[in-house]
Amino acid sequence: MLTKKKERKTKKSIVEMLMRDMQGTAAEKLALFQKLRAAGGFAKESEAELRKVENMLRTFAAAEKS
């Protein structure tokens, strides 16, 4: 009998989750990200990835204001 291999689901990055799966402006997403980060919600994520996400959200928020 043939068995079907389970396809491994790719883990969503923080950016994908915030930008695609959550509603609101970039400024609102940035505020939520900062609250979650301060509360330790991203303890298992690398600091480099978190800095990258925060900088990207800041850029998007600034672009929305213009």
Image: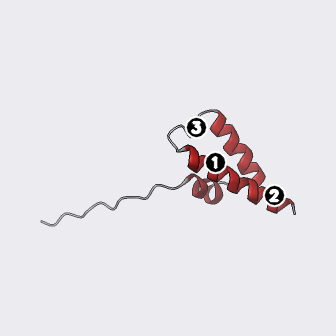
Q: Is residue 39 visible?
A: yes
Q: Secondary structure at mark 2?
A: helix
Q: Position of residue 59 (x, y in %)?
A: 75, 58
The residue tagged 1 is 51
Q: Which residue is mark 3?
A: 41
- N-terminal of the pair, mark 3 or mark 1, is 3
Q: Earlier in the sequence, mark 2 or mark 1?
A: 1
For label 3, the SS is loop
Gap in Å between the C-alphas at discs 3 and 1? 14 Å
x then y, percent, for residue 62: 81, 58
Q: Quadrant of residue 63?
A: bottom right
Among all residues in the image, which is located at the extreme bottom?
2
Q: Tell me if mark 1 has few (under 14), some (14-19) or many (20+) residues whose alpha carbon lies within 10 angstroms of its own.
A: few
Camera-near label (2 vs 1) is 1
- Residue designated by label 2: 62
Q: Nearer the viewer, residue 55 or 26?
A: 55
Residue at far front of view = 48
User: Who's the residue at 57% across and 50% down the image?
Assistant: 49
Q: Secondary structure at mark 1?
A: helix
Image quarter of the C terminus: bottom right
For the point 40% across and 58% down, the residue is: 9
Q: Position of residue 47 (x, y in %)?
A: 57, 43
Spatial CA distance of label 3 from label 2 is 25 Å
Question: Mark 2 and mark 1: span between their CA atoms?
Answer: 16 Å
